[in-house]
Amino acid sequence: MGLELLTKTLETFRTVDEELGLFASSILLGLPAGVLMDLLRLLRKLLPHHVIFLACEDIFYLICLSFLILCYTSAFGGGEFRVYYIIGCLLGLMLYYITIGAFLMKCSDLILKPVHWIWDHFVCICIKLKLSFVKCAKKSGLEKKNLQNSLPNPSQKVYNKNSRKKYAQNQKKAGKSHAERNKL
């Protein structure tokens, strides 16, 4: 009796019907993988970005896909991984991509066309504003330079040499006249 129980728990053979059911359900596993792929494609259409971010998105997608297959293996496959799970998932992903995904991407193009038109006009207005600010800043910079050139040197502004000499000469003249008054 103990030997029979041990061989039953170690035995992992499935019937052909069970294997085909697992393969068919792994094809259905391609649907959420396709939805995630379409979300990333929509994000790429909406906000074009650098190659590094595209690579990060692809790595994120592969991690999510492997996690999806891992969960499927744990829930339906009894923790046993089979290669046909991946084959079924990829087949389901291709079916989704050809049918529902193609339709959704055409719809997203129609929806995103006005969004892109608004975005392009917004960017155009921002560029024009930037150019006008730059032009204004350059003009004010030139005016500042012209003003600085027209101002006297800092040494001539307050207590410069010329005014000191004139002040000293005025004091001498004033001093002489005052001394002359005292002598009288």
Image: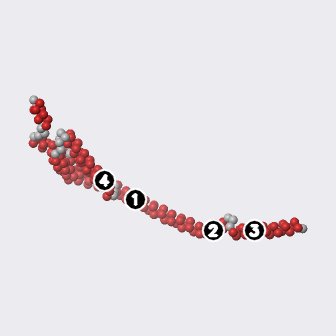
Q: Is residue 8 above or below residue 102?
A: above
Quick one: 58 or 180, which is closer to the camera? 180
Disc 1/disc 3 C-alpha distance (Å): 66 Å
The x and y percentages for residue 72 are 21, 42
Disc 1/disc 4 C-alpha distance (Å): 26 Å
Element class at badge 4: helix
Badge number at residue 103: none
Query: Are discs 1 and 4 less than 8 Å apart at CB?
Result: no
Q: Amino acid at mark 3?
A: Ala
Q: Residues within 10 Å of mark 3 (few under 14, many from 20)?
A: few
Report the residue at 23% width, 42% height from top: 71
Element class at badge 3: helix
The x and y percentages for residue 140 are 53, 64
The x and y percentages for residue 88 are 17, 48
Q: Amino acid at mark 1?
A: Val
Badge number at residue 153: 2
- Residue indicated by mark 4: 56
Disc nearer the start of the sequence (1/2): 1
Q: How is the image coloured?
A: secondary structure
Q: Is residue 110 visible?
A: no
Residue mark closest to the camera, 1 vs 3: 3
Element class at badge 2: loop
- Relative horizontal placement of residue 92, taking residue 178 as reference (left or right): left
Disc nearer the start of the sequence (2/3): 2
- Residue indicated by mark 3: 168
Disc 4/disc 2 C-alpha distance (Å): 59 Å
Q: Is residue 91 visible?
A: yes
Disc nearer the start of the sequence (4/3): 4
Q: Quadrant of residue 164?
A: bottom right
- Residue indicated by mark 1: 123
Disc 4/disc 3 C-alpha distance (Å): 78 Å
